[in-house]
Amino acid sequence: MSHISVKIEIEATPERVWQIVEPIERHVDWMHDAVAIRFVSEQTRGVGTAFLCDTKVGPIRLTDKMEITQWVPGSAMGVKHVGIVTGTGVFTLEPLDNATRTLFTWEEELIFPWYLGAQLGAFIGGKIVLKQIWKRNLRGLAELCKL
């Protein structure tokens, strides 16, 4: 299992950051590893929302099956991964400076299959590669929140 955690301070209110994060289908606008998102549930917001995310990291392409497990507008969005890579993740938004800025945290606990290197894949893929990609993703999110 690989624990990955990245954070960024965003020059926008938690409400503004949530406006960008809340539409799951728009995560491809700031997640460089997310190629496409397709809903497999009728709902597209809130706990129980299920979707497929086509992901590309270098030469590796996979479809990540996910379900929203936590939904607190302006505060948190949790997800369960039930595809090739399994585990859980959560975005949290914490107000800073009288809620004029936001600390955005992205944490994941992921289990990689044997053919993606299992524990070695978790270390290299999670601790090194994904962490760097997700830091870049958060910089993209911060830029979108400024617009």
Image (cartoon, helix red, strand yellow):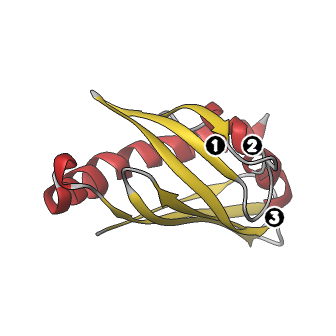
Residues at discs 2 and 1 in contact (Cβ within 8 Å): yes
Q: Are marks 1 and 3 in contact (CB under 8 Å)?
A: no
Q: Residues within 10 Å of mark 1 (few under 14, many from 20)?
A: many
Percent from the top left, x then y, of residue 14?
A: 79, 61
CA–CA distance in space, label 1 to label 3: 15 Å
| Residue occupying image coordinates x 65% and y 44% | 142
Q: Which residue is mark 1?
A: 141
Closest to the observer, 26 or 147: 26
Estimate the x, y position of residue 6 in percent, counting from the top left.
Answer: 46, 60
For the point 81% across and 64% down, which residue is it?
Answer: 74
Say whether disc 3 or disc 2 marks the residue closer to the N-terminus.
3
Dot 2 amino acid type: Cys
Q: For mark 1, give the secondary structure.
A: helix
> Can you say which quadrant of the picture contains the C terminus?
top right
Relative vertical location of residue 29 with respect to residue 118 in this rendering, above or below: above
- Placement of 90 over or under 20, stated as above or below: below
Residue at left offset 16%, top offset 52%: 117
Tell me the SS state at disc 2.
Answer: helix
Kindly identify the amino acid type of the residue bearing the numbered disc 1. Leu
Q: Nearer the viewer, residue 63 or 88?
A: 63
Tell me the quarter of the image containing the N terminus: bottom left
The disc placed on residue 74 is 3
Q: Which residue is mark 2?
A: 145
Q: Report, in whole angstroms, how far the alpha carbon at label 2 lies from the one at label 1.
A: 6 Å
